[in-house]
Amino acid sequence: MSHAYQQIMLDESAKKYVTVNTHKGLYTFCRLPFGVASSPAIFQRTMEGILQNKRHVTVYLDDILVTRANDEEHLKNLEEVLKRLKTSELRLKRSKCEFLGEEVIFLGHRISAAGVQPVAEKVQAIQETPTPQTVSELKANLGLLNYYHKFLPSLSTVLAPLHSLLKKETKWMWGREQEEAFVKSKELLQSSAILVHYDPTKPLILACASPYGVGAVLSHRMEDGTDRPIGFVSRTLNAAEKNYSQLDKEGLAVIFGVKKFHTYVFGRPFTIVTGHKPLIALFNELREVPQMASPRIQRWAVTLGGMSTLLCIEQAVSIKMRMD
């Protein structure tokens, strides 16, 4: 879209807030200007209003992604989107548009029928990032990695030595442990897997583990029996959680995974895979939670009680392979 913000007309009541004082007098914008703090939110809300109730269409500011299962349906969907933009008097720039592509780069991701993966150029830029020399440089590097966190299993555990340098009153000391974590994070990104698209017709598998932090991977069980990842999540344990028993840590990993993937698993059956057998007895829907169980365990049981789940046990080695 060409000059996207400036295609939005301002109401008379709003113009007084974007008046500019110059040496030639006062000038007032008649259209939404760039540089105003609220401009992105206003433009996003406007675009969502124009394309509301339109399935298979995703919009982020002036980037519009139109999809469908086949060319015929795609062209019909595209025609409807163009009609709505025309009705709203919004113009597109032909040189910025791509039609009927088999893959597209959208917000730093390469999206195709096979799935979603990071853009190679972005990955290469992160790979070439030099060793941070200051806290600000470290924060910038961690921000780049965290943007692609859903592709990286156990990322929080790997980055733990780096996050420790961000704590208040911690003296900057880049040692061997930090360097190894820095290199390992780049290796994770370089070897990141393609994430498959969510399919409501395929079985869901949620594998959870808690070796040093908590992490989970949501996967689809494919027709050939293999599991393909939809996304990874992880985080480190806080001071209180580090004192949890192993049972509580494993339970925390399950609840963490369920909450993070709530939009995928809520309202449909899915299987939770854990390497800790006692959880099967505690969270089994056919058995009541023991009255002597801790309040924490009882709260977690209530959380899982509102979902259609099947818990199964799997060897810890197999769980780690899923997470890796």
Image (cartoon, grey):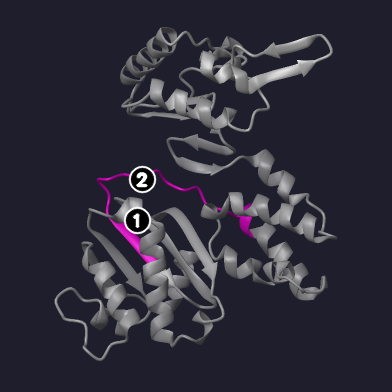
Tell me if residue 55 can be seen: yes
- The x, y position of residue 169, in whole percent, is 77, 74
* Residue type at tag 2: Tyr
- The x, y position of residue 178, in whole percent, is 75, 70
Crowd class of label 2 (few under 14; some 14 to 19; many from 20; radius 10 Å): some
Query: On the picture, is 313 further left or further right than 66?
Result: left
Query: On the picture, is 201 further left or further right than 96?
Result: left
Q: Residue furthest left?
A: 286
What secondary structure is marked by label 2?
Answer: loop
Name the dominant secondary structure of the magenta segment.
loop
* Residue type at tag 1: His
Q: Which residues are magenta?
A: 188-207
| Cα separation between marks 2 and 1 | 13 Å
Query: 53 or 57: nearer the eye?
Result: 53
Q: Earlier in the sequence, mark 2 or mark 1?
A: 2
Is residue 102 inside the magenta stretch?
no
Query: 35 or 135: nearer the eye?
Result: 35
Tell me if residue 221 can be seen: no
Residue picked out by circle 1? 262
Query: On the picture, is 299 further left or further right than 197?
Result: left
Q: Examine the rendered structure and indicate whether residue 128 appears above or below residue 281.
A: above
Query: On the picture, is 223 further left or further right than 5?
Result: left
Mark linked to residue 129 = none
| Point 33% across, 24% down: residue | 70
Is residue 205 inside the magenta stretch?
yes
Quadrant of the image occupied by residue 315: bottom left
Quadrant of the image occupied by residue 170: bottom right
Mark linked to residue 198 = 2
Q: Examine the rendered structure and indicate whether residue 141 appears above or below residue 241.
A: above
Q: Examine the rendered structure and indicate whether residue 20 appears above or below residue 299.
A: above
